[in-house]
Image (cartoon, helix red, strand yellow):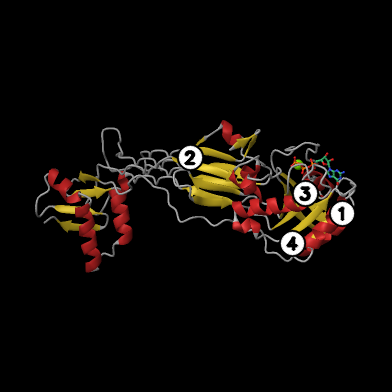
Amino acid sequence: MATNGFTDRVKITVKAGDGGDGMNSFKAYKGKPACGPDGGDGGDGGDIIFCGDRNMHDLLPFRYTAKYYAENGERGGSNKCFGKRGADVVIKVPCGTLVRDAESGKIVCDVFADGETHILLHGGRGGKGNVRFTTARRHAPNFAQKGQKVLPHALILEMKVIADVGLVGFPNVGKSTLLSKISSAKPKIADYHFTTLSPNLGVVSYYDNTFIAADIPGLIEGAAQGAGLGHDFLRHIERTRMLLHVVDISGVEGRDPLADFETIKAELAAYSAKLAALPSVVVLNKCDIAGAEENAARFTEKYGDVCDICRISAIRGEGTAQMLAKVWAKLSALPPAERIPADEFEFEEEDNTQFEIFLDENGAYVIVGGLVDLLCRNVVLNNPDSMNYFQRVLKLRGVFKELEKMGCKAGDTVVVGEVEFEYV
Ligand SMILES: Nc1nc2c(ncn2[C@@H]2O[C@H](COP(=O)(O)OP(=O)(O)OP(=O)(O)O)[C@@H](O)[C@H]2O)c(=O)[nH]1
Ligand SMILES: [Mg+2]
């Protein structure tokens, strides 16, 4: 979603590289063609990798480039040359970016820390060259394996700012002013509603400690349902460790500060129970304005027992030191910000259980391809159960049918990886 130029949600398409095909070739000398197999393996395709980058602050670059395809593996060469591995694509995203599968919405990973990498998609495996099908009896295999093909996938990238403290409150209550006083951030400040249109982050120093505060656009009644700008931005304080409720205690805009506080609490609760349950400090701002005193007394009377309350004037910088002391006392006792766990999810890949059948020089039927690789990994040769499974898979996948189509008769030799058996 892009609001006023700030991009914190985008859809992109990614694809790892296909594996290169194995080569089928024979050494050839002058006057002596086809001396022996020399076809090398194809290279693996490149991976799609995500990497956290603290110098990125939004997902704007992805509005211009929405397709990221890793390089395919090269085809194997003659003379036993391996094909080159395809180059990876490293996609840099701001820290705190959730990568979701676009179709299911499931979270694939949370790119959390600076420099943290996630291999999202592995490139397809390169196919084996014909050299690899040489055995004691098969000297001239005239076939090679194809590289593994992989599919493109659509992803949603969703930024969720990582900050320790989130500033919440109605528009124009002085959230940005407060952030500018306690941190080095220079947010836009003005006397109208919705001055802040995208989250501002500021590093706050408190003695030897630092923490990050996030100022988001003001909330209004119905924010959780999408009123104002609220809904899009509540996400950015979802993973903060605590909240600063900023209340305009002067009531200069004609609202009752106590009602404001209730409204904001209700909006947070409507958005998420977790957000509403975060520890908080309530900041009564604009204490320099006439009338603030009386409201502050009323506020303290009502909430003093259940809330941690500070009175400040952000514009004058009064009371902010005491406020920071309170914030730090709370924050330092809280666990660090959490990574959002990934959902159980696997990308659907093209059927990797393809096979091809070749007739070798000895009249044996050699089965080649992803299906064989899979079987070889999972079958223990001299175990009868395992062998039963092996036979079942071959039947189920249509291997036997295909063999018959090629003219394979009872008594003919069939070769699957290391396993050789007589066709019955
Ligand atoms: N008198 C007084 N005015 C203040 C104080 N803090 C902020 N203001 C003024 O209130 C107005 C709004 O301040 P902002 O910091 O932009 O408020 P905000 O909460 O970030 O507003 P939005 O970004 O629109 O949600 C500005 O004109 C500030 O100068 C204060 O402590 N006292
Ligand atoms: Mg603001």
Callout 1: helix, strand or loop? Answer: helix
**Mark sitting earlier along the chain (1/4):** 1
Q: What's the residue at 67%, 61% (across, down)? A: 336
Residue at mark 1: 294
Q: Point out the frontmost of discs 2 and 3.
A: 3
Say few, some or many: other residues with alpha carbon within 10 Å of mark 4 (under 14 / 14 to 19 / 20 or more). Answer: some
Where disc 3 sits, the SS reads loop
For image coordinates 81% across by 46% down, the residue present is: 251
Marks 4 and 2 in Cβ contact (< 8 Å)? no
Dividing the picture into quadrants, the one containing residue 377 is bottom left
From the top left corner, tell me how far across and down residue 240 is, in percent.
Answer: 67, 55
Q: Residue at x 23, y 67 (%)?
A: 385
Q: Which is nearer the eye, 316 or 396?
A: 316
Q: Could you give the CA–CA distance between mark 4 and mark 2, rounded to whole angstroms?
A: 39 Å
> Quick check: 31 left or right of 218?
left
Which residue is depicted at the point 38% across and 38% down?
75
Q: CA distance from mark 3 to mark 1?
A: 12 Å
Given residues 254 and 136, the one toward you in this image is: 254
Residue neighbourhood size for the residue with mark 3, other residues' Cα within 10 Å, grouped as few (<14), some (14–19), many (≥20): some
